Structure formats: structure tokens, C-alpha cells
Amino acid sequence: MNHSRDWSRRSFLQWSGTIAAMHMASYHVLAQNDTSQARPEPLIDCHQHINHFERSIDDTIRHMDATGAEKAFILPLETGEGGVTLRSETVLHAFHNYRDRIIPFCQTDVRKDDCLQRIHAYHTLGCRGIGEQKEHLPLSDPRVEAVIAVCNDLNWPITMHFEDGPNGFNMGLAESLENYLRKYKQVRIIGHAQTWWANISSEVPLPSQSLYPTGPVKAGGLLDRLLSEYPNLYADLSAGSGYNALTRDEEFTVKFFERHPRQLIFGSDCPCRDGHGQNFDGVCYSQQLQTLVKRLVPDRDRRHRIFYQNAIDALNGHA
């Protein structure tokens, strides 16, 4: 027997085991210290409804759990003109059951004489803003302005659905929105929906041609200018309209995110029941949009603003 060779083999195995153990120890230390990928990113969903596809309050919370939303702006739609009817009282009931998850908004028909009184009552009951503001009226209607003025007085945000066309909502964004932004500095106007996102480009087709324009975005769009000039204007990324606008020209979108780091806020407006596309053809807007933002915005601090901090600023206003 060659003892020297046997000793060398034993020594090598012992030495190899020691080195392997040291590497494993170093790996565990690094894994404990580098939690940037493992740590979930805080998320507020600034656009959610109850009653989508008969989704219950508890289903809505399960949707939030599945998509990682710590909190959500729950937006009533009292008139039902957009296909979903959700009373402000239902939102307040959900808030009292889930105070740590739900941020309640209110909405009431601006065409009714008691609209402003109801808004003040909802303020007393704990609502934090108005939305989704969505009636078949031109944006220039004095009753719409009265609601924006109330939000200005209450230091509230208002989420507005902009959709031009013969049966649209808050029609005339290009003609009227800037007037309100100039006049009312305290309110935070959160823009949403088809006509809002069509104006990411300077070329906007007629509503009769398309409410979901595709193809390259032409620079100089109204959204770019208004977001640059008015810090009290926010862009809600939600729904098919937001996803369509952000994916039609991703090279443009990357720069759009860079130009407006403090005014883009994550919202889903997702109607699926479980956060995985149940009852919505396997699609979850929240999951879809989160994946897109993470791909186009590699910097975690900038994503934190989109996913969380900008919603807080829109909710509370700036000091």
C-alpha cells in the first residue's frame, strides 16, 4: 500500500471539504445580505372596483393578496353608466371591514342637486377622494367643474375617466383640462382611460377611428406637456387603455417614464376575480402591468415611486 498517496488523497478530500464549507458559508452570508431581489416591492393599486363581474369585497381582497397590493383606492361608480354600479356606501362598508387595506373614494352623480352635499358627507365618513368621475358630460360642464372645485377645497385627488365620442365621458380633454389645472392648484387630477392615453402621442385619431391607437408614438403629445407643466396632474397606468399606450412604442415609453418619475402611478382597474385572470379570459391587468413596469424600469427606487410613493403623494398632496 502506498501510504503517502493515501495520505495525499485524504488530505485533498479534507481540504476540498473545508473550502466547500467556506464557500457555502460565504454564500449564505451573501444571500442574507443581498435581499434586493427577494424582498417584495410595496404596491398600492390606485384603481380598483368591487362588483366587477360580481366580485365580492372578499374576492377583491383576495385579488389584492394575489397581486401583492398592500392597499387599493376603491373607486365607486354610482351611475352605472360605465357598465359597473358600485355605491359609495358599499365602499365605506368595505373600508370599515378592511381599514388597513382599503382607501375609500366616493362618487355621486354631478347632475343631481344634492351632489356637493353628498360629497361633504362622504368626506366626514372617511372618504379620501373622488372617483371614478364618469358621466356622459363634456369636461367643460359647470357641474364637473364644481366637483373639481370641491376637491380643491378638500385637498383631495379626483380620478377622471376621459373618453371622447358621442357616448363618451368627460369629453373634451384637449380643450378643457388645462383650464382646470391652471385654476385649481390644490386638487390632484388623476387621468385615466382611452382618450387620456391616446394623447400620449401628438397624433390622436378621431374616436370614431380608434380609441386604442397603435403604432409608434409621435413625440410632443399633450400628456407629455401637461405632466411637465402641472405637478398636480397624475397618470393612472391602469386597464387596457394604459397597457396599450405603454406597449405600442416601448422605446418611447422608457423615456416617458424617465421624464415623469413623480406623476405616474400604478393602477390596474382589473376585473378578474382572483388575481390570475379568473372570469377574464386568463388575463390579470395587475400582473400584466407589473411585469411591464419591472421590465421597462430596471431601477428599483424609480419603480418604488410608480408602485407606491406617487400614489401616496397623489392622495395626500405635497407639503
Image (cartoon, rainbow, N blue to C red):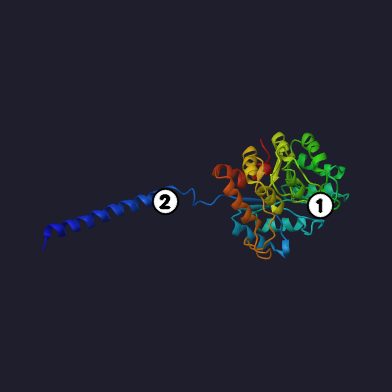
Q: Quadrant of the C terminus?
A: top right
Q: Camera-side residue: 162 or 56?
A: 162
Q: Please determine whether, in this image, residue 216 is positioned above or below residue 2.
A: above
Name the outermost residue toward the front: 215
Q: Residue at x 23, y 57 (%)?
A: 13
The Cα–Cα distance between marks 2 and 1, rounded to whole angstroms, is 51 Å
Task: Decide which of 185, 140 is in the foreground and name it.
Answer: 140
**Residue 249 drawn at (x, y percent):** 66, 46
How many C-alpha atoms fall within 10 Å of the one at disc 1: few (<14), some, or many (≥20)? Answer: many
Which disc number belongs to residue 188?
none
Amino acid type at mark 2: Ala
The answer to whether residue 225 is seen in the rendering is yes
Residue kind at label 1, given as amino acid type: Thr
Q: Secondary structure at mark 1?
A: loop
Q: Position of residue 82 (x, y in %)?
A: 79, 56
Q: Secondary structure at mark 2?
A: helix
Q: Earlier in the sequence, mark 2 or mark 1?
A: 2
**In the displayed structure, does residue 186 sit left or right of residue 139?**
left
Residue 156 visible at all:
no
| Residue 68, image quadrant | bottom right
Q: Is residue 276 left or right of residue 112?
A: left
Q: Where residue 46 appears, x then y in whole percent?
A: 67, 50
Which quadrant would the N terminus be assigned to in this image?
Answer: bottom left
| Residue in the picture at 31% in, 51% down | 22
Q: Which residue is mark 1?
A: 108
Q: Which residue is mark 2?
A: 31
